[in-house]
Image (spheres, rainbow, N blue to C red):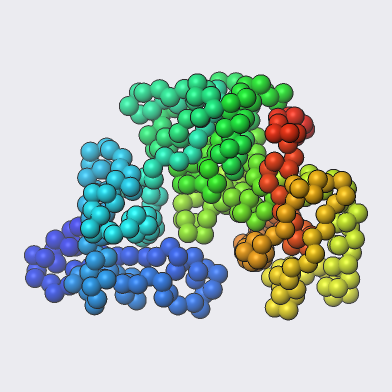
Amino acid sequence: METIFESIFDDLANGASNLSIPYRSRTATARSRLLPDAHDSSAAGVRPDGLVTFPGRTPHEANKFASLLRILEISREAIATGTVITKRNIYYQNTDLFKHQRVVDSLVDDLAFTLGVGRDDLNIVAAAKGLIAGPVTLTMRNNSVIPCGLSHESGTLIPTPKLIRKIDFGLTAWILVIEKEATFRTLAAAGYHTKSLAGHGILLTGKGFPDLATRSFLNIIHSARPHMPMYALVDYDPDGLSIVRTYQVGSSSLFHEADTIAPELRWLGIRSDQILPSTQSTETSASTQSSQETSDGSGHEPSIAERSGDELSQLNRTPRPMHNRNAPLEALSQLTPRDRRMAISMLQGISQEQRVGDTDGLDQMRELQMMLMLNIKAEIQAVDNLGDITHWLDERLCE
């Protein structure tokens, strides 16, 4: 960062006609990893040499330069004073410059990517979003103490991970990451984190798709207690599975921030065999039929990456929903066209990213294929008992 400022000062002192700031777009880089021949058309205002200049070729590039310079200035001051500032505060300090909050969000993350650091290293964070409840006490760097077991139904906002000095886990034996805030609040209000048959545990939610702070916090917990089991409870649909994968392997837009992942997170539910208790024969039949249709005669089942465009189109066609007779029909619903597109996109992404021994990836691909074949999805409530999911959780956490 200091090198950037020194370069700008030198250019000003030498009367240079253009000032420049290095800039790399996460979106373009992520796309080039999957499509090496793709050209970057999304990073408007960026020259081929990875620079944003002033006065630039267009007013947009000039504004982008000013915006980046302002963010660098704020970050430099925050680091020097040991303070942490939110992206929302940055936006409201300069609304005329940034125009929209999403501009700040994108530029901050791209700037961190350009510098090869995490966003936290810039002392810039997102506003608190995630919630935690459990017999855990957080000691902050300013020596303040946050007891996470006293908030009952509302939960405690997850603080900026960088400001946490110590975590006292007490008797914590497990952690459950929950997709939905409503389910989190129900369990927290019931005191499930202290009454579970599996012992004391931590309830955590990112309120849907998790923010960076929630993911970083989970990573810190895993680093401090690598052998403590971590579970994910999400809806049985492509969005739910996408949330699980975001916690496990990160998001494509923030793939450079490896300290925000929790690869040991286990997908507790909801899964097909939990909402369709007698689908074993259905799965076998579907698998046999699929094998007959796609096998090359050697018993090899083509991966999603090996399927032809016609075969992927077949997956994207909406079949009639196949409901199991033992499952409550009202608990199941059909995939939307968006769901189907997302499932196929995830299948392709998992196949391309898959590593040797990645059993989680194979399992997730099977479940996505099951969703597409049966054309069903279900919410967490599909496995509760008149609104009480604690017995279902006890059975699985105690396995």
Seen in the image, is 271 located left or right of residue 168?
A: right
Residue in the foreground of this view, choosing between 168 and 191: 191
Q: Going 75% across and 40% down the picture, which residue do you hit?
A: 383
The image quarter in which residue 269 lies: top right
Which of the image's four quarters has the C terminus?
top right
Where is residue 74? Give x, y as percent: 24, 49
Check the image and report above or below for 311 versus 64. below
Residue at point 23% right, 59% down? 97
- 48 versus 211 height, above or below: below
Horizontal side of 50 relative to 174 (left or right) equals left
Residue 356 seen from this side = no
Quarter containing the N terminus: bottom left
Q: x, y (%) of residue 146? A: 43, 24
Determine whether, in the image, residue 373 is placed left or right of residue 241. right
Residue 241 falls left or right of residue 123:
right
Q: Residue furthest front?
A: 330
Percent coordinates x, y for residue 53 in the rendering: 23, 70
In front here: 102 or 251? Answer: 102
| Residue 129, x across and y down, in percent | 45, 41
